[in-house]
Image: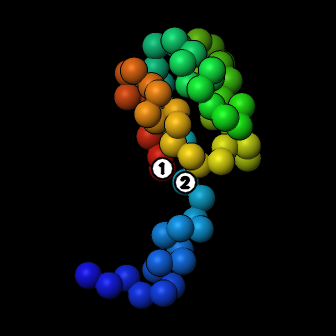
Amino acid sequence: MQIGMMGFFVERVVSMPAKVDVTKCTGCETCVSECPSEAISMADGKAKVDSDTCIDCGVCVDACPEEAISME
């Protein structure tokens, strides 16, 4: 299936910051220590992503042992 040039461009340029499912997050802080842009902090014992700092790399998604982080 071809997506065309515009679809190709949008698929790679549109920002998709990480999103934390706080019902799954156990507060282990693995994502905080693994995040290369230091975009993740802890708030009330749960991970919180700063979407302005997030570089959409997905490292936190792979690092989370609880699968509590996804890309929007």
The residue depicted at 56 percent of the width and 46 percent of the height is: 57
* Location of residue 46 in the rendering, given as x and y in whole percent from the top left corner: 56, 18
Residue 16 is tagged as 2
Q: What's under tag 2, amino acid-wise?
A: Met
Give residue 64's mark.
none
Q: Can residue 43 be seen here?
A: yes
Q: Where is residue 53 in the image (x, y as percent from the top left)?
A: 73, 43
Left or right: residue 35 versus residue 24 is: right
Nearest the viewer among 36 and 24 is 36
Distance from the alpha carbon under mark 2 to that under mark 1: 5 Å
Identify the secondary structure beneath mark 2. loop
Q: How crowded is mark 1: few (under 14 residues within 10 Å), some or many (20 or more)?
A: few
Which quadrant of the view contains residue 32?
Answer: top right
Q: Nearer the viewer, residue 61 or 49?
A: 61
User: Is 71 rendered above or below residue 42?
Assistant: below
Mark linked to residue 72:
1
- Quarter of the rendering containing residue 3: bottom left
Identity, as a three-letter code, of the amino acid under mark 1? Glu
